[in-house]
Amino acid sequence: MPCPHFDIKIVQRSNRQSAVASAAYQSGERLFSEYDQKQKYYSHKSEIVHTEILLPPHAPPDYADRNTLWNAAEAAEKQWNSQLARRFIIAIPRELPPEQYAVLIRDYCREQFVSKGMIADFAIHDKGTGNPHAHILLTMRALDESGRWLPKSRKVYDLDGNGERIRLPSGRWKSHKEDTVDWNDQKNGKLWRQGWQDTANRYLDAAGRPERLDLRSYEEQGLDKIPTVHMGPAVSQMERRGVETNVGNLNRDIRTANGLMQSIRQMVRGLKGWLSGLKEKQAALLEVWGQAKEPTLPELLSRYMDLRSGERADWTSRGKLKGAVNDFNKVREALDFLREKGISTVGSLDAYLDEVSGKVVSIRADVRKTERRIQIIDTALSHIGNYDAHREVYKEYASIGWKKKKEKFADAHREELDAYLAAVRYFKAHEKEQPFDRKKLDAERRALSGELPVRNGELKTVQADVKILRDVRNWINHVLPPEQRRATAEPGRKPSVREDLSWKADGVTRQEKQRQKERQNPPPRTGKEPDMEH
């Protein structure tokens, strides 16, 4: 069960963010920020079903108060670009009963964070629309045994080969900084995701649910699939109402491509296994057929037609004609396809399947490239839209000369200003990569969106071709002896009920005929066998 939304971000002062504001948003409480002397409050309390703060043993009890905790955490940070808190947003499996949500998050936070010395402030949001999720806010500094904030890093002097300090030309000692804790190590992101997967799956198992989370990427899972694009709550709500969106259409095209590619790969894998079995048993097959040369695929299909004709010996004339015409039409279509593709032998069929696999890989690369470019364009268009929509608000903000009036205006228009400034930062960071022309980007996106259905059409054509080859395999299997049918079956695939019954019936019939023959023509006695009559 994919549960991909697992987002980790840092609350940074350089981005005009506040740990107190983040705590106020996720908890629904009114908090006062001592840093900027402003009250923080967001009116969406109806969706907040649980809030809680988890303290390690050496944390001051006062930090169980949300306002005290986050003002203290911010007061310890003196720099303009300080990292104030680590923020998680995690989707909770809706297969679990709601009363388990808080227990699950509490268990996860204690195991992954509080046991390492972090303070965890979490809240569970659930509007009842099938999207329960948790917000977790973590402290960035460790606490000493008396509950005081420790430095994030310490100075370490570099030493030479003799263990002596190294003096620089300036007269200072060469040194570097080392983190006092490893909480910022990049490897933690993967460990925390794995920890959430394991914890959630443990609760799903305890609840008797068969679903399981897998937060690994498709690449980590060894799956040759193209990931879909995260839609976000606004787009998800529109899609649920039946309103088609660009992101929704993109994901539908990606899912179609993934389904087609998976179908083709499975059929090619099965055909490859079947061909491998034919090659291994080639000598035995030639002996059974009484041939010195490998028969061509058209010759084998001709034998299939003869076999089918013999099976209809006791049918009515009308039934024979109808069956013969039906078989002829199907086999003729396959023969036309084999002739068109230049496939006449087992070897040429093997080579064609390699060609099919290469084509699927090429189409997948094209789809992946198109999907990535569309995501880049969508991000750019979103920033262009925010820039245009909120430019006048920013101009009005910039024109205000009085400090208090300016701060009051910023509080009233925080979302608009943040979106506008984020757009400005994005344009500066990517100005050399692409032009920010809405018309050109819209036109490019329409063209790219039109390419995905074309690629899916190509995959459907390949799928139809491979299905014909799968039919050819099934027809040829009819002319193989039963033991050879078993030997050339797809590796790892159980025979169908029809195949299994057919093989068993053929085997019993042949064994019974052999016993009847022996009873009718007993072998002559040699004088060495014991006399069983006495």
Image (cartoon, helix red, strand yellow):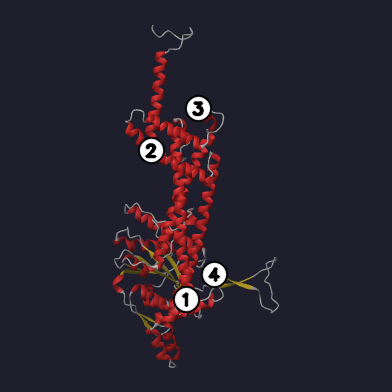
Helix, strand or loop under label 1:
helix
User: Which amino acid is tagged 4?
Assistant: Asp
- Circle 4: is it few (<14), some (14-19), or many (20+) Cα within 10 Å? few
Helix, strand or loop under label 3:
helix
Mark nearer the N terminus (1 vs 2): 2
Gap in angstroms between the C-alphas marked 1 and 4: 44 Å
User: Which amino acid is tagged 2?
Assistant: Val
**Residue 65 in sight here:** no
Give residue 83's position: percent from left, percent from top: 48, 75
**Nearer mark to the viewer, of 1 and 4:** 1
User: Which amino acid is tagged 3?
Assistant: Val
Mark nearer the N terminus (4 vs 2): 4
Gap in angstroms between the C-alphas marked 1 and 2: 60 Å
Mark 3 = which residue? 288
Gap in angstroms between the C-alphas marked 2 and 3: 29 Å
Q: Which mark is residue 353?
A: none
Gap in angstroms between the C-alphas marked 1 and 3: 70 Å
User: Which amino acid is tagged 1?
Assistant: Arg
Mark nearer the N terminus (1 vs 3): 3
Q: Nearer the viewer, residue 167 or 369?
A: 369
